[in-house]
Image (cartoon, rainbow, N blue to C red):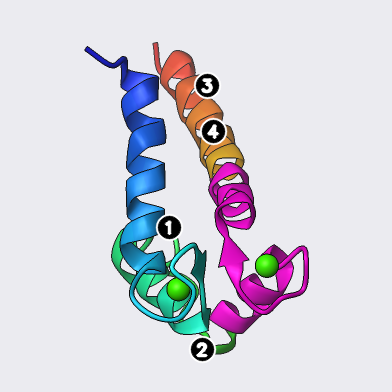
Amino acid sequence: MPSELENAMESLIKVFHRYACKEGNSTSLCRRELKDLMEHELSGFLKSQKDPAAVDRIMRDLDANGDGEVNFEEFVSLVVGLSIACEQCYQLHLKKQQQHK
Ligand SMILES: [Ca+2]
Ligand SMILES: [Ca+2]
């Protein structure tokens, strides 16, 4: 049976491909696919990003090789960035819990 972490990695790959195969190149996300993915899979994290230009900005930031699409490697850097931000919140949360004891 795969471990929790292995499952998480598999989910990451599956989610990416579920959106990437919708149109155009099936191994990368175009702007619309990225927007769809963020709206459905990252809605909790990106709720504050109501700004319609946010997708463009994120797309530009992620597109390291400048081909106008987000491949898996570029997508992973978004997930890593968000995970780091979440982990920092988690640390603060833990600290607060300890202070309340
Ligand atoms: Ca695609
Ligand atoms: Ca790219």
Q: Find out if the beta carbon at label 1 lies less than 8 Å from the nearest ligand 2 atom.
A: no
- In front of the other: label 1 or label 3? 1
Quadrant including the N terminus: top left
The first of marks 2 and 1 along the sequence is 1
Q: Position of residue 40 (x, y in %)?
A: 29, 67
Against 7, is 101 above or below?
Answer: above
The first of marks 1 and 3 along the sequence is 1
85 or 57: nearer the viewer: 57
Q: Are marks 2 and 4 in contact (CB under 8 Å)?
A: no
Q: Amino acid at mark 2?
A: Pro
CA distance separating discs 2 and 4:
26 Å
Tell me, yes or no, whether the highlighted magenta stretch contains residue 14: no
Q: Are marks 1 and 3 in contact (CB under 8 Å)?
A: no
Dot 3 lies on which element? Answer: helix
Q: Which residues are magenta?
A: 54-82
* Dominant secondary structure of the residues highlighted in magenta in the image: helix
Point 52% across, 81% down: residue: 31
Q: Amino acid at mark 1?
A: Phe
Residue position for label 2: 52
The first of marks 4 and 3 along the sequence is 4
Against 96, is 78 above or below?
Answer: below
CA distance separating discs 2 and 1:
15 Å
CA distance separating discs 1 and 3:
21 Å
Residue 45 badge = 1
Residue 95 badge = 3
